[in-house]
Image (cartoon, rainbow, N blue to C red):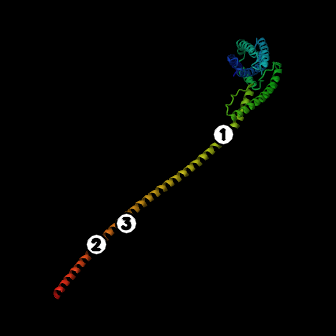
């Protein structure tokens, strides 16, 4: 990416942030603070790389850019002071929006002059290779540029090179400390929300990209530890629930088996009792029938015997009477 394209992209990024701020409602204080933090960072870095590389190269190689470069440095100076006042300023203060309005107007004017007057002259004088090398140097410088404004620091070489390096290091240390602090606070709030069964608050760290990234990392790391602990507890709970369910099924199966055995035994006993009852009934019936038959047969036999005996007695009596008659007749 060549130098002019890189700077134009920075302008577009800042303009999108300006429009977001202008659309934010009067009560959108958190959103405004977040937007302004990003504006402060973007413009601080952008101004630094222009002052370190673009303006010095243009003044040294492109005719007719000396005055434009000097005016741009003064415009930067004014913007840095406003940024330094906005940096960390409470959005609820009555002059917060007014300062942002002045900042937006100044930056838009500055961007218009650069893109319509300054950039065309530089592109017409420097070839693609030179612009590409300049763009590469500026892209590298962005990685170490200060993320906050330093209006009292030198803005021309060689003083600005050393000052920017030191300021960039200090800013990143401060941003990292700020990110750690914000991330730690958020992590504690997440833990409290978890304990109370509430929803976690949405992440809205403030400050530079380094501060926001560090805050997200710290919060994410703490959240992962908490989530792992919760997951372990959930797994243990599920294991216990599975074991309890298994024991319940086993007990239920045992109870069902006992019930089945009891029902089978009951049915068997019932069938046995019924069979015994029927057998006893059949035995009693058979015995009754046999006894009656024997009694009838015996009675018949006894009656026949008596009848026979009675006939014999009658025959004997008749014979005796006949013999007596014969004896009496003989005697007479």
User: Residue 218: which numbered mark, if any?
Assistant: none
Residue 158 seen in this snapshot: no
Label 2 element class: helix
Label 3 and label 2: CA atoms lie apart by 24 Å
Q: Name the residue under label 3.
A: 287
Where is residue 227 drawn, in percent x and y? 68, 37
Q: Residue at x 46, y 55 (%)?
A: 267
Q: Name the residue under label 2.
A: 303
Q: Mark 1 points at which residue?
A: 231
Residue 320 seen in this snapshot: yes
Where is residue 274 drawn, in percent x and y? 43, 58
Quarter where residue 203 is shown:
top right
Label 1 element class: helix
Q: Which residue is drawn at 73% across and 33% down?
A: 188
Where is residue 36 drawn, in percent x and y? 73, 20
Label 2 and label 1: CA atoms lie apart by 105 Å
Along the viewing direction, whichever of 116 and 267 lies nearer the viewer? 267
Mark 1 or 3: the one toward you: 3
Along the viewing direction, whichever of 213 and 324 lies nearer the viewer? 324
Viewed as shown, does residue 117 lie left or right of 289?
A: right
Are there few (<14), some (14-19), or many (20+) residues within 10 Å of tag 2? few
Quarter where residue 88 is shown:
top right
Viewed as shown, does residue 236 lie left or right of 302?
A: right
């Amino acid at each position: 990416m060549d130098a002019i394209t890189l700077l134009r992209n920075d302008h577009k990024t800042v303009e999108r942030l300006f429009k977001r701020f202008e659309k934010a409602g009067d009560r959108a204080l958190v959103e405004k603070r977040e937007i302004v933090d990003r504006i402060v960072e973007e413009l601080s870095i952008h101004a630094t790389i222009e002052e370190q590389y673009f303006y010095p190269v243009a003044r040294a190689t492109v005719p007719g850019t000396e005055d434009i470069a000097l005016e741009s440095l003064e415009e930067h100076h004014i913007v840095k002071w406003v940024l330094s006042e906005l940096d960390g300023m409470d959005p609820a203060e009555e002059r917060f929006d007014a300062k942002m309005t002045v900042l937006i107007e100044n930056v838009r004017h500055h961007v218009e002059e650069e893109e319509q007057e300054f950039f065309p002259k530089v592109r017409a004088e420097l070839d693609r290779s030179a612009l590409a090398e300049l763009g590469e140097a500026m892209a590298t410088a962005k990685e170490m540029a200060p993320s906050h404004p330093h209006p009292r620091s030198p803005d021309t070489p060689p003083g600005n090179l050393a000052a920017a390096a030191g300021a960039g290091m200090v800013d990143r240390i401060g941003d990292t400390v700020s990110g750690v602090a914000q991330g730690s606070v958020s992590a504690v709030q997440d833990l409290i929300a978890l304990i109370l069964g509430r929803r976690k608050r949405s992440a809205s760290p403030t400050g530079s990209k380094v501060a926001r990234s560090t805050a997200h990392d710290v919060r994410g790391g703490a959240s992962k530890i908490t989530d792992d602990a919760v997951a372990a507890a959930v797994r243990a709970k599920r294991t216990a629930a599975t074991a309890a369910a298994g024991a319940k099924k086993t007990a239920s199966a045992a109870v069902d088996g006992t019930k089945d055995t009891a029902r089978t035994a009951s049915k068997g006993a019932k069938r046995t009792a019924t069979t015994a009852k029927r057998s006893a009934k059949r035995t009693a019936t058979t015995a009754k029938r046999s006894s009656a038959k024997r009694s009838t047969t015996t009675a018949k036999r006894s009656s026949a015997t008596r009848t026979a005996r009675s006939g014999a007695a009658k025959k004997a009596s008749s014979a005796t009477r006949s013999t007596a008659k014969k004896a009496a007749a003989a005697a007479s």
